[in-house]
Amino acid sequence: MSSEKKWYAVYTKPRWEKKVADLLHKRRVDSFCPLNKVLRQWADRKKIVEEPLFTSYVFVCASEAEKLTVRQTDGVLNFVYWLGQPAVIKDEEIEAIRIFLGQHEQVKLEKVAVNVTDKVKIVHGPFAQIEGNVVEVRKNSVRILLPSLGYAMVAEIAKTKIEVINIAPAAAYSSGSIYSEKMRKSS
């Protein structure tokens, strides 16, 4: 077994994030529960409280041998999986979260409506009505792979100028190219 430690996300019982982080700390497992400072108002007062930024998630830095200890911790339901394996979180991403929360208060998370590998149709601009696959999601834009003439053209398009479409993968590639199929329909 490898003793190399990696960051993982674990899914916790609802509202157990701080408790899980504390229990992992007591078991000598490095963990990180990002806390967001939020102003809360009650009928009689206002107070800044620390709430978990990611509800029902805690990050753990564990070796293969420590994964069992993590799983056996009260409040931990399971690791977050990606492609059948516990999802590995990059050190840089954990550090970016730490720095961002250190510099900002009342941070809000926004769910990204577009994901890598989504099929999208461009609705505005010079590529309007052309379909492609998302290869990267950025803050305000996405990079879309536009298969055409056997070449891979990648265009960076504002998120406001695309819409996610639901095409069965077999139908999308039956002609060999999404772009050529779309162009054939429009001519």
Image (tube, rainbow, N blue to C red):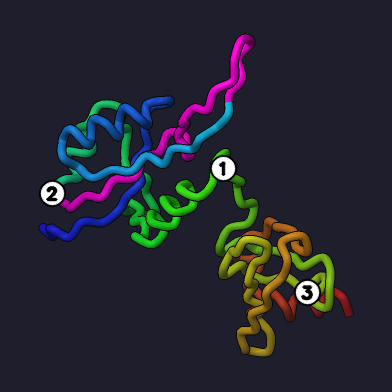
Tell me the crowding category of disc 3: few under 14, some 14 to 19, or many 20 or more residues within 10 angstroms, Cα based: some
Q: What residue is shown with label 3?
A: 182
Q: Examine the structure image and report whether residue 52 is included in the region drawn in magenta.
A: yes
Q: Earlier in the sequence, mark 3 or mark 1?
A: 1
Q: Examine the structure image and report whether residue 46 is included in the region drawn in magenta.
A: yes
Q: Label for residue 88? A: none
Q: Position of residue 163 (x, y in %)?
A: 74, 59
Q: Residue at x 54, y 41 (%)?
A: 105
- Is disc 3 placed on a helix, strand or loop? helix
Q: Earlier in the sequence, mark 2 or mark 1?
A: 2
Residue 139 vertical position relative to residue 174 in the rendered view, above or below: above
Is 165 situated left or right of 184 in this image?
left
What's under tag 2, amino acid-wise? Ala
* Highlighted range, magenta: 40-65
Q: What residue is shown with label 1?
A: 107
Of discs 2 and 1, which sits in the foreground? 1
Is 49 situated left or right of 177 in this image?
left
